[in-house]
Image (cartoon, rainbow, N blue to C red):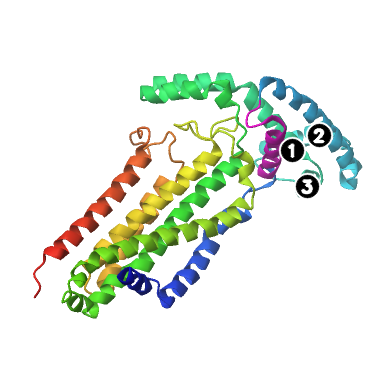
């Protein structure tokens, strides 16, 4: 334990921790912070999030047919509220826009005329339209109507999707799964689009950062020992001959701790947006988001994403330690660390967290991935890194002491 504690102290050096902290702050500001600030990007997304929150609280994770009928009454109430709100806008009253119907017709005529004139906008009328948008519940009405249209045409849409997959000769497993997703208990879920998209993008950025921070933390340690010829002195003792195993354990433990810290730090602003309101909602639903392979709830899906990131991070740690063992200088290690980060973090991490466990191709226009491919890939990478580390330790113990 004393050797392990010493190796941990060598890894967790104040200088590298400060560098990781500063780089992490810059990275967060440049990439994932956008998906927190614009968790619901735009008034339409905000309206959808607000409505979905109300419906989940009132109806549960799915919207049943008898509950769908209640949306007609909600729409009528919102239109009445719109009529009162637009009456309080002097610019609208001045041109005779006194209720929802007159404004909807005015808006339609304006945009039709703009399209017919080659896209030349009347800035006064454009300003008035957006003034009404901002001063009323227009986006709420639009989202209710949009949701009702999607709900009412789901059966037809699902039938077209299924027939299209069959016509394209896609795998039978995908066609069968699409038929399952068309069943009402799966098709009527209330997970809103803003939550789906922000989860995907935020998770991808988090995976990339976890790999980068681990590479930065671990790559100098074994190189520093080699430059200072620490290994030769350690080999003169019985316990020192197995020091590499202790260093590997210290590195993997450090990677686990750093990943957990990253997950907690990133989870705080993400959960502050209250996505867990929808933790019991399925991944499919009214606002379609791909075709998931598994009947997971959104809460379960978040746990799966955490597992993927943990496994990817540990695999990156194992590969980093393996490569640093064969680097004779910091420059040599840097030349190995950069391609490792790009391959495991930027490429593989972004790919793994891009709507994992749903229908998607290996690459654009490439073959379709079988069910559970992401788990196989990350488990294989983790296994490869573990085997490489184990073989390195075994080879080290068998080397002659010169």
The mark nearer the N terminus, 2 or 1, is 2
Residue 118 lies, in percent from the top left, at 65, 41
Which mark identifies residue 134? 3
Q: Residues within 10 Å of mark 1 (few under 14, many from 20)?
A: many
Magenta segment includes 46: yes
**Residue at the disc numbered 2:** 78
369 up-or-down from 312: above or below: above
User: Alpha-carbon distance for marks 1 and 3?
Assistant: 11 Å
Rendered location of residue 200, percent (x, y): 51, 46
What segment is highlighted magenta in the picture?
Answer: 45-63
Q: Secondary structure at mark 3?
A: helix
Q: In the drawing, does residue 222 fall left or right of residue 166?
A: left
Q: Which residue is mark 1?
A: 140
At numbered mark 1, what does the secondary structure look like: helix, strand or loop? helix
In the rendered structure, which disc, 3 or 2, sits on the residue that comes first in sequence?
2
Q: Quadrant of the C terminus?
A: bottom left
Mark 1 or mark 3, earlier in chain: 3
Residue shown at the point (28%, 65%) measured from the top left: 246
Q: Residues within 10 Å of mark 2 (few under 14, many from 20)?
A: some
Residue 169 visible to an observer of this rendering: no
Locate residue 116, reporting x and y percent: 67, 36
């Amino acid at each position: 334990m004393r050797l392990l504690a010493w190796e941990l102290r060598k890894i967790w050096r104040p200088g590298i921790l400060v560098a990781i902290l500063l780089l992490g702050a810059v990275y967060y500001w440049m990439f994932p912070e956008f998906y927190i600030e614009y968790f619901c990007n735009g008034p339409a997304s905000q309206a959808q999030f607000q409505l979905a929150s109300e419906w989940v609280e009132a109806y549960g994770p799915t919207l049943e047919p008898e509950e769908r009928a209640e949306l007609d009454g909600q729409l009528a109430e919102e239109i009445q509220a719109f009529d009162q709100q637009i009456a309080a806008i002097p610019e609208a009253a001045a041109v005779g826009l006194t209720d929802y119907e007159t404004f909807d017709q005015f808006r339609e005529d304006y945009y039709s005329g703009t399209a017919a004139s080659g896209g030349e906008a009347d800035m006064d009328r454009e300003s008035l339209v957006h003034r009404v948008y901002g001063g009323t519940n227009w986006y709420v009405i639009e989202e209710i109507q949009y949701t009702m249209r999607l709900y009412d045409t789901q059966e037809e849409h699902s039938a077209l999707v299924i027939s299209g997959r069959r016509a394209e000769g896609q795998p039978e497993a995908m066609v069968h799964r699409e038929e399952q997703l068309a069943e009402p208990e799966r098709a009527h879920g209330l997970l809103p689009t803003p939550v789906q998209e922000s989860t995907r993008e935020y998770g991808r950025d988090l995976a990339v950062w976890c790999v980068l921070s681990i590479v930065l933390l671990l790559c100098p340690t074994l190189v520093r020992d080699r430059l200072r010829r620490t290994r030769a002195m350690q080999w003169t003792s019985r316990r020192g001959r197995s020091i590499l195993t202790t260093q590997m354990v210290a590195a993997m433990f450090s990677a686990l701790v750093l990943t957990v810290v990253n997950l907690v730090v990133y989870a705080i602003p993400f959960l502050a947006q209250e996505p867990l309101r929808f933790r019991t909602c399925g991944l499919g639903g009214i606002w379609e988001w791909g075709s998931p392979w598994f009947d997971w709830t959104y809460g379960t899906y978040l746990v799966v994403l955490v597992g993927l990131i943990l496994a990817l991070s540990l695999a990156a740690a194992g590969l980093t330690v393996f490569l640093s063992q064969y680097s004779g200088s910091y420059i040599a290690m840097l030349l190995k660390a950069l391609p490792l980060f790009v391959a495991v973090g930027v490429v593989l991490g972004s790919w793994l967290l891009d709507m994992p466990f749903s229908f998607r191709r290996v690459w654009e226009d490439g073959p379709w991935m079988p069910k559970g491919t992401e788990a196989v890939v990350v488990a294989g990478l983790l296994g490869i890194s573990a085997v490489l580390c184990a073989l390195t330790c075994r080879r080290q113990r068998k080397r002659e002491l010169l």
